[in-house]
Amino acid sequence: MALEKIFSSLNISATGLSAQRQRMDTIAQNIANAETTRTEKGGPYRRKLVITREAPVTVFPKYIENKIKLEPTSRSHFKDEPVRGQMPVPSGTEVADIPEDPAPPRLVYDPTHPDANAQGYVAKPNISVINEMVDLISASRAYEANITALNASKDMTKKALEI
């Protein structure tokens, strides 16, 4: 089994786990702040979104050089472009950004609230706990799928090494 094929599937699953973990953390932060009307920036808490993207494709020797800091004996050993027969190694996924949701806050009539405006309305976070829970379940399932893929890859590697 080619070395790059062993590590690529493990790396892809690991990046998926990391991205889904960050997504779950952000969703938990949104749920925890669903009623927060005061923030350091002023105004109510703003829902955060997680934007993921495909990580750049790397060539395996370049990947090793960057991760392990190998010193090549010749620069031709570590070319940026793939040479004939050399497989590009996909890097999986990564979190591109965690922006605030641009949707306006919810206005709730509560003239007794300390943060109510002159008309008696309180600006509450633009968060639907139901939608956040659906997103949390989705992130949790994606996390579990990445664990399953990682374990399958690990088991296949162990079996290959037993030969």
Image (tube, rainbow, N blue to C red):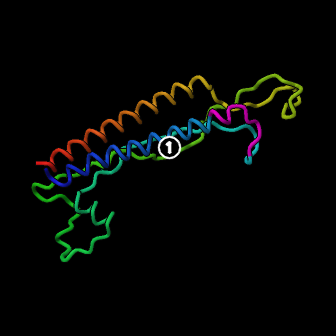
Residue at 27 percent across and 62 percent down: it is 64
Q: Position of residue 129 (x, y in %)?
A: 62, 26
Mark 1 surroundings: few (<14), some (14-19) or many (≥20) residues within 10 A = some
- Quick check: 81 above or below 103? below
Residue 38 lies in magenta, yes or no? yes
For badge 1, the amino acid type reads Gln
Q: Position of residue 99 (x, y in %)?
A: 56, 43
Q: Residue furthest front?
A: 162
Dominant secondary structure of the residues highlighted in magenta in the image: loop
Residue 94 lies in magenta, yes or no? no
- Quick check: 11 above or below 106? below
Q: Is residue 146 left or right of residue 6?
A: right
Residue at 69 percent across and 38 percent down: it is 45
Q: Position of residue 155 (x, y in %)?
A: 24, 42
- What's the magenta region? 31-39
Residue at 69 percent across and 32 percent down: it is 125
Q: Position of residue 79 (x, y in %)?
A: 20, 65
Identify the residue under disc 1.
Answer: 22
